[in-house]
Amino acid sequence: MESAPQLAIARELLAQLFPGEDADRIVRALLVEREAQATDSQDAEARYDSEREIGMRNLARVRGQFALGAAARALQHAFNNPLTALLAEAQLLELETLSEEQQLAVTRILNLTRRLAALSRRLGTPGSTAQAR
């Protein structure tokens, strides 16, 4: 079962990725799918009759999780580079003499960029939701 902070992060990310969609409904559907896969996995594991077969299946699962983690880190890095550049440019714009409307737009850009950076940090460190708060 997922912890409440992890579910909150998942909902926040899904809401940002899919604006206008019901993030709670998506999270519930993903959790139901995960439970179904776990049940299928338990059934399949019960069919194995040797320790070697069980070990090979567990090794394949760990390798898959490792690959997924590596892909997530690469994606986070690729996401952070343009995000950092955007934040730097917006901070420079903030120092310029701008109209009130332009200043408000720059402030919105800064706030949204900082939220995305905080979300990226939280997603990059599993189990550490307090880091970006």
Image (tube, rainbow, N blue to C red):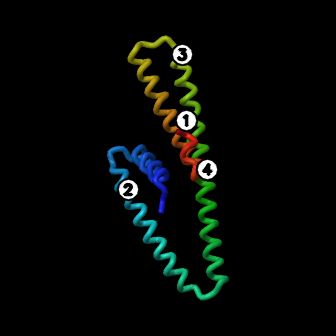
Asked whether disc 1 touches disc 2, contact meaning CB atoms under 8 Å apart, the reply is no
Tell me where residue 132 sits by quadrant. Answer: top right
The Cα atoms of the two marked residues, 1 and 2, are separated by: 26 Å
Q: In the depicted view, which residue is nearer to us: 78 or 117?
A: 117
**Of helix, strand and loop, which one carries label 3?**
loop
Query: Is 17 displayed left or right of 83 in the figure?
Result: left
View extreme (right): residue: 52
Query: Who comes first in sequence, dot 3 or dot 1?
Result: 1
Residue pictured at 49% horizontal, 52% vertical: 6
Query: Percent from the top left, x then y, of residue 80?
Result: 58, 39
Label 4 crowd (10 A; few <14 / some 14-19 / many >=20): some
Query: Is 8 displayed left or right of 58 in the figure?
Result: left
Asked whether disc 4 touches disc 1, contact meaning CB atoms under 8 Å apart, the reply is no
Query: Who comes first in sequence, dot 4 or dot 2?
Result: 2
Residue that badge 4 annotates: 73
Label 3 crowd (10 A; few <14 / some 14-19 / many >=20): few
What number is the disc on residue 83?
A: 1
Q: In the depicted view, which residue is nearer to us: 51 or 60?
A: 51
Label 1 crowd (10 A; few <14 / some 14-19 / many >=20): some
The three-letter amino acid code for the residue at tag 4 is Arg
Residue pictured at 61% horizontal, 44% vertical: 77
Asked whether disc 4 touches disc 2, contact meaning CB atoms under 8 Å apart, the reply is no
**Of helix, strand and loop, which one carries label 2?**
helix
The three-letter amino acid code for the residue at tag 3 is Leu
Query: Percent from the top left, x then y, of residue 27?
Result: 40, 56
Residue pictured at 65% horizontal, 72% vertical: 59
The three-letter amino acid code for the residue at tag 2 is Ile
Residue that badge 2 annotates: 26
